C-alpha cells in the first residue's frame, strides 16, 4: 500500500508522478508516487491543459520544453483569417510568424501583401487552471520535502479543494490565500513579492515551500515565469526546518538538474542581487 497525497488515501496501484511535468520544465528525479487512475485523470485535466495554454506555449517553444511525445510545441491559432477573408492557420514560432492557407493547402510568403494583417479567433485562456496546477504541485512538493509531517500538520484539504476545482460545486468555505499570474496581490504584501522573485531568480521552473508560524505557502514558476502562489493554515512548528533547509525549501529544475536550497539561502542571494542592481 502506498499513500497518495492527491486523494489522501492508500492505493494498491501506485505510479510515479512528475511533480512538475516534463513539458513544463520538470525532471525525472523530481517525482513522488500517487494513485495511477487519479493521476491519469488529473494529469489530463490540469497538467495537459496548462501545457497547452496559449501563453505557456510561447515559453515552451522558446525553451524547447517537450513532454513524453518529444514533439516541439509551437503556439498555433487554427482559426484565423486574412483581411481578404482567406482562412489560415497561424504559427507563432520563435523563428517568426508563419501562415498556412487552408483553402489551397500551402504556406503564404511573408512578402505577400495579404499577410500584413491577420485576425485570430478563438484564443482561449483558462484563468482557473493556474491555481489548480499550483495546488496540485503544492501537495506533491510538500509531500516530497516533508513526507508524512506535511500531511499531519498542514491543512492539505485546502489544496485539494483548489486542485479539484468544480465550478458547479464550489466549497462553501476556504481558508486559502491565493494569487496567480492574472491576480494583483494585496497592497503591502511584501512576502508575496519576495516569493515571486525567488521563483524567477533561476530563470527555470521552480517550487518554493515557505512555512510561517501559522501558514504554509507554496509559490510556483514555469520556465522562468511566476505562475501562482497559495497559502493555507498549518502548524509549522511541527515541520522540520533546520540545517540545510532552514525556513523552507527552494527547488529549481535548472541545467537538467534538480537543485534544492534553503529558503534562507535564496533569500540572501536575492538580497545580494538586489543590492548590486541599486
Image (cartoon, grey):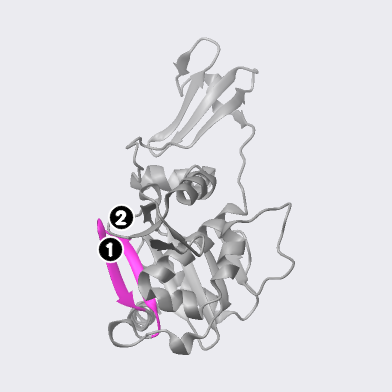
Q: Which of 215 and 272 is in front in this view?
A: 215
Instruction: State the extent of the magenta-drawn residues as a range.
Output: 247-262
Discs 2, 1 touching: Cβ within 8 Å: yes
Badge 2, how many Cα within 10 Å: few under 14, some, many 20+? many
Q: Earlier in the sequence, mark 2 or mark 1?
A: 2
How many callouts does the rendering have?
2
Q: Is residue 37 left or right of residue 124?
A: left
Prevailing SS of the magenta stretch = strand
> In the rendering, which numbered label is found on residue 185?
none
Left or right: 232, with 69 as reference point: right
- Residue under numbered circle 1: 258
**Residue to which mark 2 is pinned:** 27
Q: In which quarter of the image is the C terminus?
A: bottom left
Left/right of residue 85 with respect to residue 209 in the rendered view: right
Q: Quadrant of the N terminus?
A: bottom left
Residue 94 to residue 4: above or below: above
| Side of 69 where 160 appears, left or right | right
Say which of 4 and 276 sits in front.
4
Residue furthest top in the image:
104
How far from the left and from the top, in percent, is residue 106? 45, 14
Question: In the image, is residue 259 above or below residue 170?
Answer: below
Mark 1 element type: strand
Q: Position of residue 138 (x, y in %)?
A: 48, 66
Q: Which residue is drawn at 30% across and 55% down?
A: 27
Q: Is 276 drawn above or below residue 95 in the view shown?
A: below
Amino acid at each position: 500500500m502506498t499513500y497518495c497525497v492527491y486523494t489522501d488515501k492508500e492505493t494498491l496501484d501506485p505510479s510515479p508522478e512528475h511533480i512538475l511535468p516534463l513539458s513544463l520544465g520538470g525532471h525525472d528525479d523530481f517525482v513522488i508516487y500517487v494513485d495511477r487512475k487519479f493521476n491519469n485523470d488529473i494529469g489530463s485535466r490540469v497538467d495537459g491543459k496548462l501545457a497547452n495554454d496559449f501563453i505557456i506555449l510561447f515559453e515552451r517553444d522558446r525553451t524547447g520544453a517537450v513532454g513524453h511525445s518529444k514533439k516541439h510545441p509551437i503556439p498555433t491559432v487554427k482559426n484565423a483569417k486574412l483581411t481578404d477573408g482567406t482562412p489560415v492557420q497561424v504559427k507563432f514560432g520563435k523563428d517568426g510568424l508563419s501562415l498556412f492557407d487552408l483553402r489551397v493547402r500551402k504556406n503564404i510568403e511573408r512578402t505577400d501583401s495579404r499577410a500584413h494583417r491577420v485576425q485570430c479567433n478563438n484564443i482561449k485562456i483558462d484563468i482557473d487552471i493556474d491555481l489548480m496546477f499550483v495546488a496540485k504541485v503544492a501537495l506533491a512538493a510538500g509531500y516530497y520535502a516533508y513526507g508524512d509531517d506535511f500531511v499531519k500538520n498542514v491543512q492539505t484539504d485546502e489544496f485539494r479543494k483548489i486542485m479539484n476545482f468544480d465550478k458547479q460545486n464550489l466549497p462553501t468555505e476556504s481558508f486559502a490565500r491565493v494569487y496567480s499570474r492574472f491576480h494583483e496581490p494585496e497592497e503591502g504584501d511584501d512576502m508575496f513579492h519576495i516569493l515571486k522573485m525567488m521563483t524567477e531568480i533561476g530563470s527555470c521552473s521552480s517550487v518554493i515551500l515557505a512555512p510561517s508560524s501559522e501558514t504554509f505557502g507554496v509559490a510556483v514558476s514555469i520556465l522562468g515565469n511566476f505562475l501562482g502562489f497559495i497559502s493555507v493554515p498549518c502548524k509549522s512548528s511541527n515541520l522540520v526546518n533546520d540545517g540545510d533547509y532552514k525556513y523552507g525549501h527552494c527547488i529549481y529544475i535548472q541545467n537538467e538538474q534538480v537543485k534544492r536550497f534553503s529558503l534562507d539561502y535564496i533569500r540572501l542571494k536575492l538580497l545580494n542581487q538586489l543590492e548590486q542592481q541599486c
